[in-house]
Amino acid sequence: MKSFIVDLAERSYPIYIGKGLLDCLHEFDIWLATTQVLIVTNTTIAPIYLDRVTEAMKLLNGDMQIHAVILPDGEQYKNWVTLNLIYDALLHYKYERGCLLIALGGGVVGDMAGFAAATYQRGVSFIQIPTTLLSQVDSSVGGKTGINHPMGKNMIGAFYQPKSVIIDINTLATLPDREFSAGLAEVIKYGLINDTDFFCWIERNMQALLLRQPDALIYIIERSCLNKSLIVSSDEREAGKRALLNLGHTFGHAIESHQGYGKWLHGEAVAAGIMVASRLSHQLGWLNAEQLLRIRNLLECARLPVLIPHDMNPMDFYEKMQVDKKVVNGKIRYILLKNIGEATIENNISRDDVITAINHCCL
Amino acid sequence: MKSFIVDLAERSYPIYIGKGLLDCLHEFDIWLATTQVLIVTNTTIAPIYLDRVTEAMKLLNGDMQIHAVILPDGEQYKNWVTLNLIYDALLHYKYERGCLLIALGGGVVGDMAGFAAATYQRGVSFIQIPTTLLSQVDSSVGGKTGINHPMGKNMIGAFYQPKSVIIDINTLATLPDREFSAGLAEVIKYGLINDTDFFCWIERNMQALLLRQPDALIYIIERSCLNKSLIVSSDEREAGKRALLNLGHTFGHAIESHQGYGKWLHGEAVAAGIMVASRLSHQLGWLNAEQLLRIRNLLECARLPVLIPHDMNPMDFYEKMQVDKKVVNGKIRYILLKNIGEATIENNISRDDVITAINHCCL
């Protein structure tokens, strides 16, 4: 088992990464001590893992009050109505401030359980047990929680850190290929932002990853979490360099927002978004043609989309980008690439340049 | 003008208290600097003060983007549907992370604008301009924000501090008598908790207060805010002594919850709740009969209810108390009085004792 600490002063917490951790949850008793636990999961994950986690909690404390909320699965349910299912359960079963929420599932479950924990009785404890590659490498680190609003993704939320994160790579065995690939988009992103060696490692080992070779999985999850935690530790509330983590996301959010959430997976939208950002970086004379091709090839090897959806035209796309948390003084902060392994924040990119880049990423 | 700082480390903020401050808002430019401001107010306050605040903001910066959201007035609207009016406006007008929310109104407006600020884009700035006595002496200090859930009051929320609080006592001139009295319930509460001299001062000066004599108003607001800020500074997230501020509130919330919010004002429910707490303290041998009478007399002089509503029986009452943030390990933490000016937190009060006290406060 690997473990390290996300350093956030009094909100620091550990991440554990290993094979079969769900079968030895009792060893994490120090993080699970409570008298009331609510397991938040979804309709896909519950049949596979809910009993196992429930039994582990019972072993820890036979008197523990344990309930579960099973949410519908998908980004299109990451909204107020679904969030209320969690509040309703907490109130119905009279959960107190000393209770613990366990987020058992992917990024949507983690974001909603985390936001419920941040806001129920003005804040209770929560633990993340992410079960998708995307949530293991991204959303379980950094404390961003929240829900979507019909007018914008993740527009309502809070920064709120878990007590710990427990990552069992065995849960990836049941993950559909499409979701696995979506997670790889965020992994590739870390290489592009700040870690050239990691990008090269992924290029060399893509086949092992697609075969879900355990050591390769543990390696990319640990290195991704480390990359992210270093950035988050230095800028928890995204005043500055944390914005680098949004590479591909402003473009990606436009796709998700246009489609109404849930058609493309988040990681798929990010992959296409990374291509738009890379194309724009190339136009500006930063990335050369070979680098642009390497990025495109790696995304394609990971079975990710590199073009924007058929039904979006560049004007739709540009309009959707205007409602985004990355907008400052009416200007979008673009995250672009000076090189593979060197991202930059740019505020003065012309509308024409952006639309040209989007055009290049249409069919 | 009086002013002092609520000491909360990097979240510290100033409170200004004076006569006519709304007419010189431009002097608070350091707190109001932004390019996008959303004024959150309600249907009662907007016709009286909205133009004045809007004009003041225009004076500060002619290019400022200024919009207002006018919420329905009343505790029964302190819910998700109303909160969404704020999010909708923020998103519709493309407000960015650097925006400022101004809460112009009473406690309900402050709680909702504050929670919207805490959660819009995971946190933006806000300023409180409280216009009711209750919000001036209580809810504008301490950073509790949130909304009600059908199953419990203030069950969804966040601790989130404003950048500053500007209290203009001239706004009390238009406050209905019933709401003014409701505010006095919280003022009397501070005397009871920790400030015997203040309690005696209120006893001596109740007539001046009911006549809304300006110096008396400034005095009680300042002393109430100081009392509250000392407690909040030592325990921002209510791990310990901040719970003392809930004197009368666990009982009061049961009344509000039973009635469905909005029939009795919050301060009225707190007044009746203080009487139940005082009665219980008397039963336990702490408050003597004379002290009990002084409390009852002072509340009655302030034109506040000292009995629970006709349509509630003690069992209803007890049941409603079980869903409350003050419940720990299935036990309610009662805030009781050892003396006038000395509150205490008690975890081991028997159900029978509580029901006897409630019975005494029925007609």
Image: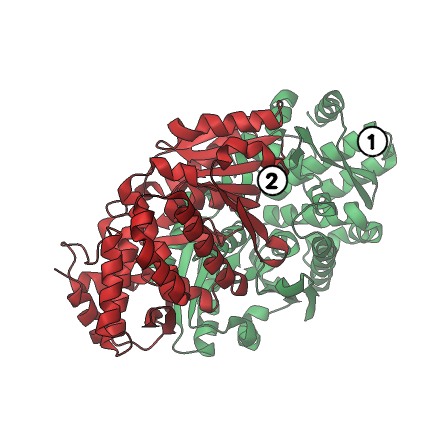
Chain colours: A red, B green
The chain letter under disc 2 is A
- Going 59% across and 70% down the picture, which residue do you hit? B21
Tell me if residue A241 can be seen: yes
User: Which of B273/A121 is in front?
Assistant: A121
Image coordinates of residue A281 in percent, x first then y, are 27, 73
Does residue A154 appear to the left or right of B348 in the view shown?
A: left
Residue A31: numbered disc: 2
Image coordinates of residue B172 in percent, x first then y, are 60, 58
User: Which of B259/A231 is in front?
Assistant: A231
Tell me if residue B83 can be seen: no
Classify 10 Å Cα crowding around label 1: few (below 14), some (14-19), many (20 and above).
Answer: many
Residue B353: numbered disc: none
Q: Mark 1 and mark 2 in contact (Cβ < 8 Å)?
A: no
Mark 1: amino acid: His
Tell me the CA gap for discs 2 and 1.
Answer: 42 Å
Mark 2: amino acid: Trp
Image coordinates of residue A302 in percent, x first then y, are 27, 52
Closer to the camera: disc 2 or disc 1? 2
The image quadrant of residue A61 is: top right
SS class of the residue under badge 1? helix
The lab-note entry on whether marks 2 and 1 share a chain reads no
User: Which of A210/A46 is in front?
Assistant: A210
Image coordinates of residue B314 in percent, x first then y, are 65, 22
Classify 10 Å Cα crowding around label 2: few (below 14), some (14-19), many (20 and above).
Answer: some
In the displayed orientation, state which residue is furthest to the left: A363
- Going 38% across and 39% down the picture, which residue do you hit? A172
Q: Mark 1 points at which residue?
A: B282
SS class of the residue under badge 2? helix
Does residue B156 appear to the left or right of A210 in the view shown?
A: right
Q: In the picture shown, does residue B32 fall above or below B192? A: below
